[in-house]
Amino acid sequence: MQIDGIKPHHVRGYMDKRGEQAKARANREKALLSHVFNKAREWSYTDATNPCQGVKGFKEAGRDRYVSDYEFRAVWEKADQTLRDAMDLALLTGQRPADVLKIKREDLRDGALWIVQNKTKAKRAIEITGELAALIERIGARPRERLSAWLIQDDDGKPLGTFGLRSRFDKARRAAGVEFQFRDIRAKAATDTGDLAHSQKLLGHRNREMTEQYVRARVGERVSPLR
């Protein structure tokens, strides 16, 4: 089919079929198609209207998964050393998976870990103290065949990418018999601080209400009994 032949009913048909098993993925794939089509229009490959326009996506429920200490440790025990580094770094910094993987050694300076978040462009300077300092020291002290610019790397110097992270994490959680996603570690970090103000700063949320909703959805709101 030529690009000009793609019509909204084709997109709708694909969405309905894909949505039978993966509604969230169907939404992401429609967004990708829309982006590709807009680029095609921008580069004069077509002047047809974007076929994704007006095609509604599926409603998605927000995640409310809280990862217990036991679950985290169970997967950690089945992980290889590189994945353990990534899990620990995600937990201690509260950053999204992509932001954890892109951390370079040059981002460690002046006693802090400097991060610019991909999604919001929020800037964070996380103090290198306590367990985070011990983790970075552990990573730096490990013998390597080749040293990479990235903090999370294999012994041969290759940085851990998104696909590699997912593959290794899926393998470890299957071996542990535990079901949660790597991105849920960020929510665990936010919840485990026990301090909403701290969590808001660590995660880079714009306001306290966002952090409150983020945490409450996972552990519930603490209330007093009747008597």
Image (tube, grey):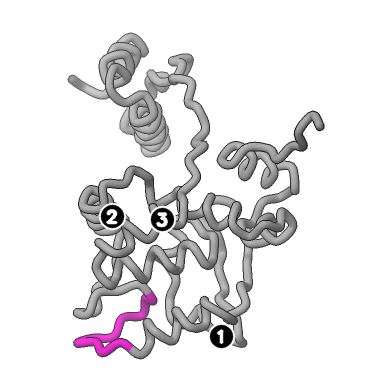
Overall secondary structure of the magenta section: loop
Q: Residues within 10 Å of mark 1 (few under 14, many from 20)?
A: few
Q: Is residue 121 above or below residue 61?
A: below
| Range covered by the magenta-colored residues | 142-151
Quadrant containing the N terminus is: top left
Secondary structure of residue under mark 1 = strand
Secondary structure of residue under mark 2 = helix
Residue type at mark 2 is Phe
44 and 140: which is toward the camera:
140
- Whichever of callouts 1 and 3 sits on the residue coming sooner in the sequence is 3
Residue 66 locus on image (x, y percent) = 50, 45
Q: Is residue 136 magenta?
A: no
Secondary structure of residue under mark 3 = helix
Question: Can you tell which quarter of the image residue 10 is in?
Answer: top left
Question: Can you tell which quarter of the image residue 142 is in?
Answer: bottom left
Mark 2 → mark 3, Cα distance in angstroms = 16 Å
**Relative to residue 158, is residue 42 drawn left or right?**
right
The residue carrying mark 3 is 70
